[in-house]
Every structure is written in C-alpha cells, then in structure tokens.
Amino acid sequence: MKIAIVQNDIRSNDFSENLEHLETLIDQHPDADMFVLPETFATGFMPEGGVGGSDYTGYDILQWMGTKGFLYDAAVVGSVATKDDAGQLRNRLYFVRPDGKDEYYDKRHLFTFAGETRDYVPGDRRVIAEWGGVRFLLQVCYDLRFPVFSRSRGDYDAIIYVANWPEQRQDVWQTLLKARAIENQCYVIGVNRVGSDGTCKYIGGSVVIDAYGRTIAQCADGEEGIATVELDMEQLQRFRKKFPVLDDADKFNVL
C-alpha cells in the first residue's frame, strides 16, 4: 500500500483554483495507491464570509475526488465542507475509492475555540474504511486531542488525521501524532496544510509515523509537496503479536 501525503497551500473559498492546483501536485505521483489531502483542502477552514455561496453543497468537490481516484486507480481522502440533506454544514472527511464508492466521517470534535460550532454540526459516528487490505480510522484535526475517541479496539491498522493545524501549536501536532501511533500500535498518517488564511499561519508537518513512533515519511516544513511511503502490514502484525500491548488495554466503548 503506497500512501501519498499531499501538503498544499489553500486559497480561501476558491475551490476551482485549489482543485486545479492540487492536480498539478497529484499528477506527479500517479503510482500511489492512496492520496491523502488536508482538512477542507478545497475551501480552507472557515473562510471569511462562510463557505461558498448560497448554492454551495460541496458535492462538486466530491465528484472531483472520484474522478482523480478513477484516473489513478487510487483512493482519495480529504475533508470537504459539505451541506447534508438537511442543509446543515458538516466538516466531512471523504474516503473515495477508485470505483467511485465513498464512505465519510463527520468531524466529531468541532473546534469551539475558533467558532467552528457556530457554523458546523458535529458527527456522531466512528468510521473505519478498508482499502487494499488496510483498515483506516478516519479523524479530522481537533479529534487528535481526544485519545479516548480514537482508542484501538483491534479494528484498524492506521489512523488518518487531516488538519488545518496552525504553526503556533506545531509541537502539539507532532507530539500527539506520535502518541496516537505508539498507544494504538498503528500507523498514523497526519496531513496538514501550509500557507496562511489571514487568521493563522500553517507550516505543514505532514508525516507518516509507524507503530514504534518513528517518522517514516514527511513533507518539508513550510513548503508544498508530496511524500510517499509503503505501509508494511506484515511488519505491523509481527510487532503487535510480539508485543501485544493492546491485549492489556482497558475495556470501554465510546459511540
């Protein structure tokens, strides 16, 4: 399973320009099995004046993800500001397979500090998507701070975190990504944006971390780019069997 993490700048509320620019990045790595994009990769996080216009739904962006996935025979994963059937805005992480079928996770922990709860409705489902024999737990940005919600039940092999995580809290981002990998004996895929949205500056820090807490792929800080890595599932299973920490984990359920 070859993962490509995509670290890009985002122009606020200009999804046509953002998608066109992303294509120039993605087209450089046509052999990847999965492309992981940042949180709200097409619009930016809570742009001034709200997301899109009155007719915006986010489904054009979802269609673009499906088209790119079909073209490269790869899964495409990224968060999209999406209006649901009731017209409510969701921070929705789509996992789109190359056959066009998708699963989605609505961000559970909305970032109240920045006012996300004013515009968005939280999700209430824990979602795991399988692709190429790998099980992925889907998470969005602020979810990273809540380890109980992402605690392994033996039901996934990797966690995907997509984010707009600002530079001033970059050390927290790096520390918590490693913690989630170590405590859950899993791969962690963390993808963050670069640039500025007028409120915050972002320097990326997009990484893939293995179950030992080691960084096995990363994008350069402050730069757009893509990093790729092969996930070694046999190595992961050997480690879990040799050092079965999860067998001693506390038993509880959340959602």
Image: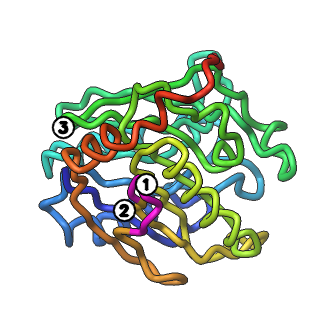
Q: Give the labeled residue for mark 3.
A: 132
Q: Residue at x 64, y 31 (%)?
A: 149
- Which mark lies nearer to you, 2 or 3? 3
* Mark closer to the chain start, 2 or 1: 2
**Does the stretch in magenta take in 9?**
no
* Mark closer to the chain start, 2 or 3: 2
Q: Position of residue 234 (x, y in %)?
A: 19, 45
What is the three-letter code of the residue carrying label 2?
Ile
Q: Say left or right for 64 vs 67.
A: right
CA distance for labels 2 and 1: 8 Å
What is the three-letter code of the residue carrying label 3?
Gly
Res. 64 in view:
no
| Residues shaded magenta | 210-215
Q: Disc 2 vs disc 1: Cβ atoms closer than 8 Å?
A: yes
SS assignment at label 1: strand
Q: Quadrant of the C terminus?
A: top right
User: Within 10 angstroms of label 3, few (less than 14), some, or many (20 or more) residues?
Assistant: few
CA distance for labels 1 and 3: 16 Å
Q: Residue at x 50, y 55 (%)?
A: 42
* Mark closer to the chain start, 1 or 3: 3
Res. 81 in view:
yes
Q: Say left or right for 162 vs 96.
A: right
User: Within 10 angstroms of label 1, few (less than 14), some, or many (20 or more) residues?
Assistant: many
Q: Position of residue 75 (x, y in %)?
A: 26, 43
Q: Residue at x 63, y 64 (%)?
A: 175
What is the three-letter code of the residue carrying label 1?
Ile
Q: Give the labeled residue for mark 2.
A: 5
Q: Position of residue 127 (x, y in %)?
A: 48, 26
SS assignment at label 3: loop
